[in-house]
Amino acid sequence: KGVDLKVHKGEIVGLYGLVGAGRSELAKAILGKFEVTSGEVIVNGSVAKINSVADAVGRYGIGYVSEDRKAEGLILLHSVLENVGIPIWRRLSQLGGFLTNGKVRKHTEPYIRKLEVRTPSLEQRVGNLSGGNQQKISVAKWLAAEAQVLIIDEPSVGIDIKTKTYLHELIRELSDAGTAILLITSDMPEMIALADRIVVMNDYAVMGGLANTRDYTEMSEGIMGLIQGAEPTAA
C-alpha cells in the first residue's frame, strides 16, 4: 500500500526498513511472484505486464538476488553451470540450434571467473560450496542474464568480510555500467556506504526518501525519523 518510488539507470536506491516492513514482499511483487492488485510497474517508460518471474526476467530484464539463496536463489542439488545458466536458457534457445552445456558455458564462465567463484569445476554441486561462493553464484547468474534492473536483497548475509567487500565493489561497478539497482539491506552502514538515495518502508508502505549524504549520524536519524512517521519526502 502507498508504494511510490523510482529507480533510475545507473542508480543505487536503498530500501530500508525494520523486519516486517514489506521490503522483500515489494521486491517479489515487482518480480511477478506476488500479484499487484493496483497501480503500475513502469520499465523504461512503459507499463510492464509482469504475470510471472519469467516475464520479469525474460521480457523486462529484472533480476533478483534473494536473501534466502538456499531456498529461493539457488538449486543446491544442481551444478554451478546449471545455476548460473538458468536465467539465459530461454534466450540461448531462441538463438537457434540445441541448448548445450558448451553454449551455456561460453556465456556464463566469464562471469564466474570475474567473481572468482572457488569451485573444483563448473559441474560441482552448488550445495557443496561455501556460503560466500554460493552468494557469488547468485550474483553471477544475473550478470550473465545482463539484467537491466537488479534487486539485491540482504547481500551480506552469511558471507565473510572479504567477500562482502568484493560484492560492494561489484554493486558499484554494475551501477557505474548503467544497471538500476534496488538494494534491500538491514545493515545501515552498508546502506549508507552504497546507496545514492534511501527509501524507507514501514508497515508495507513507503514513508519517504532521503538523498544520501554519507554522514552516518545524519542519515540514521533521518531514516529512523521516517520510520517513526516524520514528514514524508519524495521517494
Image (cartoon, rainbow, N blue to C red):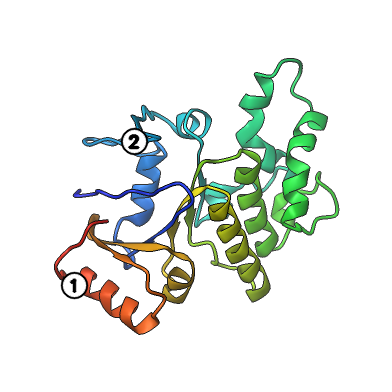
At mark 1, the secondary structure is: loop
Q: Residue shown at 44%/69% (left/top)?
A: 191
Q: Amino acid at mark 1?
A: Gln
Q: Residue shown at 15%/69% (left/top)?
A: 229
Q: Residue furthest right?
A: 120
**Residue indicated by mark 1:** 228
Residue 103 vertical position relative to residue 150 in the rendered view, above or below: above
The x and y percentages for residue 8 are 40, 48
Q: Residue shown at 41%/69% (left/top)?
A: 186
**Residue indicated by mark 2:** 42
In the image: residue 20, left or right of residue 189: left
The x and y percentages for residue 6 are 33, 48
Marks 2 and 1, how far apart at CA: 29 Å
Q: Which numbered circle lies on residue 203? A: none
Instruction: Examine the image and state in which quarter residue 95 appears.
Output: top right
Nearest the viewer among 65 and 176 is 176
At mark 2, the secondary structure is: strand
Q: Amino acid at mark 2?
A: Ile
Q: Quadrant of the C terminus?
A: bottom left
Nearest the viewer among 81 and 190 is 190
Q: Residues within 10 Å of mark 2 (few under 14, many from 20)?
A: few
Residue 3 vertical position relative to residue 89 in the rendered view, above or below: below
Judge depth for marks 2 and 1 and give the one in front.
Answer: 2
